[in-house]
Amino acid sequence: MGYKNVWEPKGVYRRYSGRVSGTTIRNAVEEIEADYRFDLIRYVINDYLAVTETDVKDIELKLIAAIDSAASTYNQRIKIAQVTTCPDVTEIVTYYANQLRDNTYKTQIFSTLEDARIWVEEY
């Protein structure tokens, strides 16, 4: 599977591991955004610390951005914390955050889960 979504009282903690592809990320995103609880969440923490390899194509990132854009019409209050120390993942999430989206969701990259949790709790 490559990921696990864990619902929390105010959001979702998502842990990626092993080899992560664009399809893996898209499946993880669609699972949350199709859930009836999506309208109520305030954050998503994407934890990439256990990722060992990535295979994400530009076209896949564009599709994920389009899916997120459509979902944002239902919930615009979400913050996305990207947690990674891997240069490849940092490049992907930076490209997604700065180039593909219309900045619907406030997004920030962190190197520790603790820092990400502090940030998502700030309203």
Image: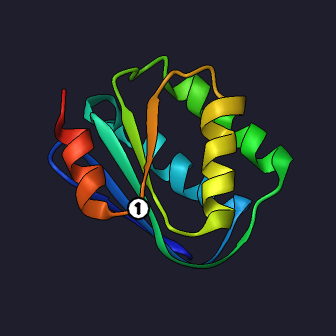
Q: Left or right? Give the position of 16 relative to 60.
A: left
Secondary element at tag 1? loop
| Residue 76 visible in this rendered orientation of the protein | yes
Q: The N terminus appears in which quarter of the rendering?
A: bottom right
Residue 37 position, x and y percent, is 29, 39
Left or right position of 23 against 70: right
In percent of the image, x 33 and y 63: which residue is there? Answer: 112
Residue at (62%, 62%) from the top-left corner?
A: 89
Q: Mark 1 points at which residue?
A: 111
Horizontal arrangement in the rendering, residue 8 relative to residue 81 (left or right): left
- For residue 67, above or below residue 45: above
The one nearer the camera, 76 or 35, is 76
Examine the rendered structure and indicate whether residue 41 appears above or below residue 92: above
Q: Which amino acid does label 1 sit on?
A: Ser
Relative side of 63 to 73, left or right: right
Q: Where is residue 107 in the image (x, y as percent from the top left)?
A: 46, 36
User: For this rendering, which residue is in front, 111 or 78?
Assistant: 111
Q: How crowded is mark 1: few (under 14 residues within 10 Å), some or many (20 or more)?
A: some
Q: Quadrant of the C terminus?
A: top left
Residue 66 can be seen, yes or no: no
Question: Residue at coordinates 14% horizontally, 47% vertically from top-left?
Answer: 9
Residue beneath the point at 36% across and 31% down: 78
Residue 8 drawn at (x, y percent):
20, 53
Q: Quadrant of residue 87?
A: bottom right
